[in-house]
Image (tube, rainbow, N blue to C red):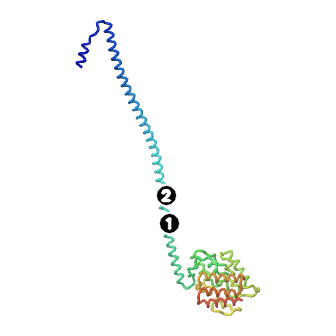
Amino acid sequence: MNSDHSTKRNIQLPDSPDECLGVGIKVIQNAYMSKMQSLEHEVRALRLSLDQEKAAHMQTMKRANALDVELIDSRERCKKLQEENRNLIQNLRAQNQQLEHFERLKQTLVGGLDSFQSESSRMHDGDGSGYADTRFLRRESFLQGIAPMAASSAPPPMCTTPVGSASVYGSFNSNQNHHQFGFPNAGGFSNNNMLEAGATTSHTSPVNNSTSSISGIGMQQKSHDSAMPDVSGDSGAGGRPSGIDGKSFFKVARSRLSYECFNKFLASIKRLNAQEQSTDATLADVKKIFDEEGEGNDDLYSDFAALLHRRD
């Protein structure tokens, strides 16, 4: 700096005032240009910085807008989750109530089943007045096959439940005025009476016509005054006494034969009642069925043959 000042001091100014004025103007111009260049450089730097700040500001604004959108979505999602939570709580309460209801129903069913089993065992251990063979409790065809047919009074409607079937059967057995298979205690029972009994019970009982045909055991139309003798042996009107009646025979057959053989036996009786086969063919068919069941059924065959021959 001192050398520069000394150099400047050593510069000789021209003697002419005009020349001195020109030198001064050049100095001013040089200083102005130098200052202008420095300011322009600073302006360019500031503009570059301003552009960078604007870009950063735009990025910040975009980020802020994205965050606003995410905030709105998060709030909506939060509302949906809260609503779903309330619905789940309500569903959970409803499921708990249903579970409690089902538990109570289960306890009721278990109690009813226990009482039914105890009732069944008590009926099985009884004196035979009730229905004790549980193999046929749920067999509708078997219930139709053993339902009694009465000419004067129709039995109550059959119940398809096991307990109802057993109780109805017990009430049928307690009737002292008619036999189980449609034979009155006294007097005859012709085909006309059998048809009337079937027509009477068809309105009050779901028992079909095959039951009435079974209860008739193949009786033929002879005359209006011809009657079938009582199979119980106590009528004394045209029939020789026997040690077994129709009700006792079918009860013993039901207890000794299997379900399949008993159904075949009933089907053979139905064919006889429908006049699709003769008495001899029926006896041969029944003999074959009893032989298929096993030995020891000769007494059943003899009783059945006696019943068929007695009604002729």
Which residue is depicted at the point 48% across and 53% down?
A: 84
Q: In this orientation, does residue 1 appear?
A: yes
**Residue lying at the far right of the rendered structure:** 223
Return the x and y of residue 104 as percentages of the image width and height: 49, 67
- 289 left or right of 8 in image: right
With respect to residue 79, does 130 lie above or below?
below
- 225 left or right of 135 in image: right
Name which residue type carries label 1: Phe
With respect to residue 103, does 302 lie above or below?
below
Q: From the image, which quarter does the C terminus lie in?
A: bottom right
Name which residue type carries label 2: Asn
Task: Quickly name the residue at label 2.
Answer: 91
Q: CA–CA distance between discs 2 and 1?
A: 16 Å
Task: Quickly name the residue at label 1.
Answer: 102
**Residue lying at the far bottom of the rendered structure:** 240
Mark 2 residue element: helix
With respect to residue 104, does 18 lie above or below?
above
Q: Quadrant of residue 26?
A: top left
Choose between 192 and 52: the one closer to the eye.
52
Which residue is depicted at the point 68% across and 79% down?
A: 210
Return the x and y of residue 151 as percentages of the image width and height: 69, 81
Which residue is depicted at the point 68% across and 90% down?
A: 235
Q: Residues within 10 Å of mark 2 (few under 14, many from 20)?
A: few
Q: Quadrant of residue 189?
A: bottom right
Choose between 236 and 37: the one closer to the eye.
37
Which residue is depicted at the point 61% across and 86% down?
A: 292
With respect to residue 84, does 32 lie above or below?
above
